[in-house]
Image: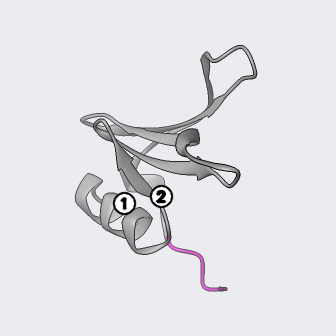
Amino acid sequence: MTKEELTSWALSNGWQMVGDHPSLMKPTNAKEAIVRLVLKTTVAQLEIKKPSGKWEKVQSESYTKITYDDYA
């Protein structure tokens, strides 16, 4: 998977671009992101927003190891 394919997938599945990052928005406040993908040159990082307002990296993986799930 490429950075562009991952961005396209995220946007087609309800994610929104906030700054330069595909982000999931907080249901009760559609202006506040709670999860985001930080797409770097060779890796994608999944980050969650802590109650303190800081972003915490949960997972990082190279694009070559990211695949679509068959269920949905």
Instruction: Say whether marks 1 and 2 touch (CB < 8 Å).
Output: yes
Local SS, label 2: loop
Q: Residues within 10 Å of mark 1 (few under 14, many from 20)?
A: some
Q: Which residue is mark 1?
A: 6
- The type of residue carrying mark 2 is Ile
Q: Which mark is residue 37?
A: none
> In the visual, does 56 lie left or right of 68?
right
**Chief SS of the magenta region:** loop
**The N terminus lies in quadrant:** bottom left
Magenta-highlighted residues: 68-72
Between disc 1 and disc 2, whose residue precedes?
Answer: 1
Q: Is residue 70 above or below residue 12?
A: below
The residue at 41%/55% (across/down) is: 16
Q: Which mark is residue 66?
A: 2
**Distance from the alpha carbon under mark 1 to that under mark 2:** 9 Å
The residue at 24%/59% (across/down) is: 4
> In the visual, does 34 lie left or right of 43?
right
Q: Position of residue 22 (x, y in %)?
A: 40, 49
The residue at 72%/13% (across/down) is: 52
Q: Residue 27's quadrant in the figure? A: bottom right
Q: Position of residue 68 (x, y in %)?
A: 51, 73
The residue at 59%/42% (across/down) is: 35
